[in-house]
Image (cartoon, rainbow, N blue to C red):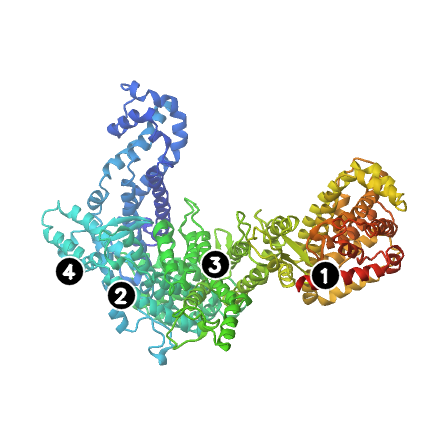
Amino acid sequence: MSRGVIQPSQQKLAEKLTILNDRGIGMLTRVYNIKKACGDPKAKPSYLVDKNLESAVKFIVRKFPAVETRNNNQQLAQLQKEKSEILKNLALYYFTFVDVMEFKFVVPEIFVFLHFSCQTVNFDLTKNYLDLVVTYTTLMIILSRIEERKAIIGLYNYAHEMTHGASDREYPRLGQMIVDYENPLKKMMEEFVPHGKSLSDALISLQMVYPRRNLSADQWRNAQLLSLISAPSTMLNPAQSDTMPCEYLSLDTMEKWIVFGFILCHAVLNSDAAALSLWKLALQSSTCLCLFRDEVFHIHKAAEDLFVNIRGYNKRINDIRECKEQALGSMHRERRKFLRSALKELATVLADQPGLLGPKALFVFMALSFARDEIIWLLRHADNIQKKSTDDFIDKHIAELIFYMEELRAHVRKYGPVMQRYYVQYLSGFDAVVLNELVQNLSVCPEDESIIMSSFVNTMTSLSVKQVEDGEVFDFRGMRLDWFRLQAYTSVSKASLGIADHKELGKMMNTIIFHTKMVDSLVEMLVETSDLSIFCFYSRAFEKMFQQCLELPSQSRHSICFPLLCTHFMSCTHELCPEEFMCPHLFICLMAKQARNLITDICTEQCTLSDQLLPKHCAKTISQAVNKKSKKATGKKGEPEREKPGVESMRKNRLLVTNLDKLHTALSELCFSINYVPNLVVWEHTFTPREYLTSHLEIRFTKSIVGMTMYNQATQEIAKPSELLTSVRAYMTVLQSIENYVTIDITRVFNNVLLQQTQHLDSHGEPTITSLYTNWYLETLLRQVSNGHIAYFPAMKAFVNLPTENELTFNAEEYSDISEMRSLSELLGPYGMKFLSESLMWHISSQVAELKKLVVENMDVLTQMRTSFDKPDHMAALFKKLTSVDSVLKRMTIIGVILSFRSLAQEALRDVLSCHIPFLVSSVEDFKDHIPRETDMKVAMNVYELSSAAGLPCEIDPALVVALSSQKKNISPEEEYKIACLLMVFVAVSLPTLASNVMSQYSPAIEGHCNNIHCLAKAINQIAAALFTIHKGSIEDRLKEFLALASSSLLKIGQETDKMTTRNRESVYLLLDMESPFLTMDLLESCFPYVLLRNAYHAVYKQSISANA
């Protein structure tokens, strides 16, 4: 394009400023990372810490930038060995410094052409110019802070010299630059003397913007700043300003412009009152500025050190000291306080009326920018303040302000199409018309400017709402760049069309540019006005703020803002130096843990309240009532009366707040935060806060259930199943209430946890309640039964303690009655009860194995006795040859006891399942009852297995069959079958010996014997059924044989005359009155007349009555 009066080098001014600013940020990123790497002993280049190279490095730094390789071979000899590695590993560092040097030489060239008056109407040009000045200054300052820069550059160059025989071609200029910029600001103050006029003009143009932005909270409050409802009549009017882009310009950015700008052109401070006013206002606002990320610049000290050596600057030094004293945090504290309420009001109104995002979009971005500035100011100063005692730099409510920022950001993202629709109509229906009129009224408009202006009007006129509805992607970047170019063309001296003479045009175009951003650059606008990615570099302060937020109940509802901030971190990278940073895992995890802890505390309280309702606690109340009725004295005088359950719900007034109320309040606040967003996306990873909570609840619920069993391995104490069930239900009730706060599937938590508790070990390999209770019942309760301390009482369907010298530490009845077994079945479920049954069967299997050994020892005698039951004398002689008779009976009794316990467990399981799944249980029961007798045994066993899993009693116990069939068999099946038959013979012929035992007396009250021999009948039936099912024998025939032998042996007792031998004869007779699915009463009558059983019952009952009398 031919520009006439404009020099060719000026034609690309907009492009150069754009590219150089982006390049400068990339260079800052790389130099910053070098500084951090050199400051970290772990990340620092190894050559800088290598002891062998220490003398060489010191020599290089001392001689820098001179190169002397010939006369110092001894000191540099070590470098010869490492030269190739040094070149390879330090190349990235060295060429980064070279790039900085190239940037440093290019930037001043562009300043030469910027001798013009910058105004707020040419906003883009002014901003990019000042940004470049600050970026350039910042880059040189950070470069000077890399202490190892000389060592790195020198090492690389010496290695290059040794390898290629000459220094790197860039080294002389680079070395000189490093030396020149030892004190970068002092050097740049000299460098900017020629550019002082243009820089000061640009800075002074801020006098209409910066003071208006840097107001106190009271001034904001009086002006009703950011309020949509202060003037309801103008609520739908579009927010307008003559300086639209300046309204949401970062205050922090402007302060950097002013501070660094006036340091570089400091002479204007003595000659221009407006400049001095801006300078002093900036010095009063902050004590330090952000250079880049967490690198800061202490304004007052640096400025004072620079000015102290300049003649005639005593007054400026005094100004700096005065401003330093006035630079307090109270103003910023009050601003944050105002912004919290202002942003809350704005977010609430926009949530209710999102259509207002159209006309009031400027308010939203102003609010975001103001809040962002105050948050960054606090973060920067809290980490770098000298006065640690002041409260102005500690804000426990900062999370609330960040949260409302996130709410506004969410509204903009959610209702982006609403804003697009509004501004598309605005651009085409109003902006295009006004701009066209302004262009038509221009007295002078060169051809090139006219073409650009016309393209603006045509672009806006062609817009329509249909494009928004069709989801068309808008792109006005070209239009905005053209306006930037136009500013450059019209801002130089001697321009045909001077922008300074047509301010209305500039103001209108700035407004139009803002409107175009509302259509195609909403995400970029959010980054520009509310990016808080700087938190990534203040990780300690970030975590501290988060902890403060969690500790303050009123702020915990806003804690989600910290994980949300992690989504900002993606915007702090640059294509010249891509990096990865921290993720929100830590914060979400801590939030979930805090919620879990609150829930656990509530559950503990609820379990305590549920425990008060247990039946055991009503005994004292009943006792007091009985004593009161009989007028007996109760307890000690002055003893406090026990509070009845439910007292905690009685409130004297609404102000009374219990601990449970506080916990619920804290939980609801925190759950609001966890439920605020369904998921977060950070660095292509998706984080779901609710899943974190679910996971933590599962882990804690698992630990709590196991913990509530209160199992003590040393003392073998454990909670009663009914009490544990009560506590678990109370816990589950609380967890179910969590669904009122958070959208999570708590049923999934129950299924995952409770199903794991029905297994031997959970998913983490830890013991479950199934393994704990199984172990306790087997190793504690049933072991004490075997030791004779506990007996099974059929009449009570429970195990009961027997009076012994050593009292047991637990009451067996409280763990084995019907209600406790049902509670156990509720807790363990069918899977857990199956595991319990399998464990019981394993113990039975071991007893049967021992019985088989005893049978083998007496095989010959038993074989003869099997065929001689009708020869009394011969049988008596053979019986005397038997060994271990008592052991056989004891082991069979133990088997009977275990089977009796299992029948209690199975009955309880059936009762529980009948309540939960009655139709399914009745179907299984019907299926079992109607299985034909001729059915194949494999099919029948499958049916029995199904029935057993439902708690139904079976003729043949499938679990026992599996346990016995899994025993190792070292002999032939025929021998195994013979041993099984002889086992029945052994038991049958051994029964008469029980009559001589004192403990064998039958007790009508318990419908059994105190030594548990009444369990023999169940053992005989079940063992016979299992063994002969395995060996495919006839169960009925074998039991008939057993009955014949047993009756023959017992009838002989009646002929005995020794009273000691026959003391409990009638009690032993009653063992034959056993219920068996395989034998009939007719068969019993033929072997052992029922009249004998009737007489035996009469005798034991008569004996019991006389004993009681």
Is 320 placed above or below 35 here? below
Horizontal side of residue 736 vs 832, given as left or right: left
Task: Quote the CA–CA distance across marks 4 and 1.
Answer: 123 Å
Of the numbered discs 3 and 2, the one sitting upstream in the chain is 2
Is 80 placed above or below 341 here? above
Viewer-nearest of discs 4 and 3: 3
Task: Quote the CA–CA distance across marks 3 and 2.
Answer: 35 Å
Asked where in the image residue 118 lies, by quadrant, the reply is bottom left
User: What's the residue type where badge 2 is placed?
Assistant: Glu
User: What's the residue type where badge 1 is placed?
Assistant: Gln
In front: 1052, or 645?
1052
Reading the image, the residue beneath label 3 is: 596
Reading the image, the residue beneath label 2 is: 334
| Residue 500, visible in the rendered structure | no
- How many neighbours does mark 3 have within 10 angstroms: few (below 14), some (14-19), or many (20 or more)? many
In front: 908, or 469?
908
- Give coordinates of residue 955: x percent, y percent: 80, 56
Task: Quote the CA–CA distance across marks 1 and 3.
Answer: 63 Å
User: What's the residue type where badge 3 is placed?
Assistant: Arg
Of the numbered discs 4 and 3, the one sitting upstream in the chain is 4
Q: Tag 4, which secondary structure? A: helix
Tell me, yes or no, whether the two marked residues, 2 and 4, touch with CB atoms within 8 Å: no
- Give coordinates of residue 490: x percent, y percent: 31, 59
Of the numbered discs 4 and 1, the one sitting upstream in the chain is 4
Reading the image, the residue beneath label 1 is: 1103
Seen at 29% across and 25% down, the residue is 55
| Residue 34, visible in the rendered structure | yes
Viewer-nearest of discs 2 and 4: 2
Query: What is the number of the mark on residue 470?
Result: none
Reading the image, the residue beneath label 4 is: 273
- How many neighbours does mark 1 have within 10 angstroms: few (below 14), some (14-19), or many (20 or more)? some
